[in-house]
Amino acid sequence: MAFEVEIATVINGTPLRRRVSARQHLADFLRDELELTGTHLGCEHGVCGACSLLVDGEIVRSCLMLAAQVDGKRVDTVEGMSESGALAGLHAAFARRNAAQCGFCTPGMLLTAHELLAQGRPMSRTEIREFIGGNFCRCTGYEAIVDAIESVLEQSK
């Protein structure tokens, strides 16, 4: 039997107490236990960004973080951020610019873009590209994604 620990966390605004395996990754916990499947698993090495989500407001790679590590923390997934309306401007811009083609990278890309926008400062296209550089997109070549993020930045001026 695997060693278990009890965690108390807030997932998408909802307090949660649960026993988790000490070795269970956060991505697996969210997907398998909570059925929050917007968190995608790509490389499982923290390189592709598909598993990105927010822990206490900062982007983390949930394939590298253990579920036990979110004890006492707030976790926001693409589902929660979408339902709250926090990603509405980005959703609209991604749709307008056709920035989500296959959609696999989109949840992590949206949350990374949200963190970028939260900085509240203007950014050049180069800075946007650098900021999202840890999220791999194999379909778009990033132009449409950068266009979408840039358009939301412009609207927020």
Image: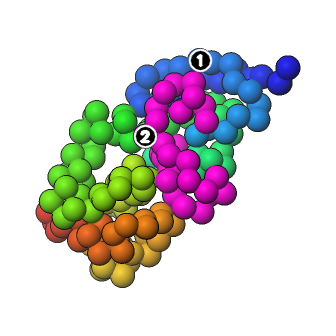
- Callout 1, which amino acid? Arg
Q: Main secondary structure of the magenta part?
A: loop
Could you tell me the amino acid type at mark 2?
Gly
Residue 78 spot, x, y in % from top left: 39, 42
Task: Decide if residue 55 is on the left or right side of residue 108.
Answer: right
Q: Which mark is residue 95?
A: none
Q: Is residue 76 above or below residue 7?
A: below
Q: Secondary structure at mark 1?
A: strand
Asked if residue 18 is among those painted magenta in the image, a careful observer would answer: no
Q: Quickly name the residue at label 1.
A: 17
Which numbered dot is residue 38?
2
Q: Is residue 87 visible?
A: yes
Answer few, some or many: residues within 10 Å of disc 1's Cα (few below 14, many 20 plus, some between 14 and 19): few
Q: Which residues are magenta?
A: 28-55
The quarter of the rendered structure image containing the N terminus is: top right
Tag 2 secondary structure: loop
Residue 59 visible: no
Q: Position of residue 58 (x, y in %)?
A: 49, 51
